[in-house]
Image (cartoon, rainbow, N blue to C red):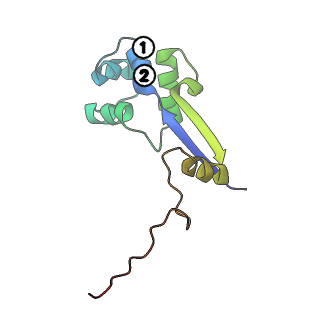
Amino acid sequence: MKRKVDYTWRLAELMAARGMNTTTDLIPLLAERDITLSRPQVYRLVNQRPERVSLQLMSALCDIFGCGPDALLTVTAVNDREHHRAANAGPNVVRLDRAVRPRRANILDE
């Protein structure tokens, strides 16, 4: 069975919990660990969901915040069919079977 795998990047939450209000607060802490990133790179790292992260950078972030990789990202995995079923089963979803479809109008010539 196919599974739908997704993740949530939580670096901004960890920074806020530590009182780091700007992304540039992270640059000197990374530099202490021999990781050199520009301001735009750090901004994208914090505010966007990265697709590729080096293990050195991940290790440095874990060292800075005193946490493990599981605190930096949250992984979710569900079966693909359950994912589709859950998306269509909400109370705001209208099923379009024949009972709720409008009837075709008959136009009469007068």
How far is disc 2 from disc 1 in space, using C-alphas? 6 Å
Total of numbered circles in the picture?
Answer: 2
Amino acid type at image mark 2: Glu
Would you call the spot at circle 2 few (<14 residues within 10 Å), some (14-19), or many (20 or more)?
Answer: some
Q: Secondary structure at mark 2?
A: helix
The residue under the point 46% across, 17% down is: 64
Identify the residue shown where x is 55% and y is 43%. Answer: 6
Asked if residue 78 can be seen in this view, the reply is yes
Residue 18 at what x, y percent from top left? 41, 12
Image location of residue 62, percent across then percent down: 52, 22
Left/right of residue 33 with respect to residue 62 in the rendered view: left
The amino acid pointed to by label 1 is Ala
Res. 50 mark: none
Residues under numbered marks 2 and 1 in contact, where contact means CB atoms less than 8 Å apart: yes
Q: Secondary structure at mark 1?
A: helix
In the rendered image, the residue lying farthest to the front is 110
Residue that mark 2 sits on = 13
Vertical placement of residue 38 versus 83, above or below: above
Q: Is residue 79 above or below residue 105?
A: above
Residue at position x 43%, y 26% from top?
11
Q: Residue at x 53, y 38 (%)?
A: 7
Where's residue 14, x and y in %? Answer: 44, 19
Residue 73 percent coordinates (x, y): 53, 31
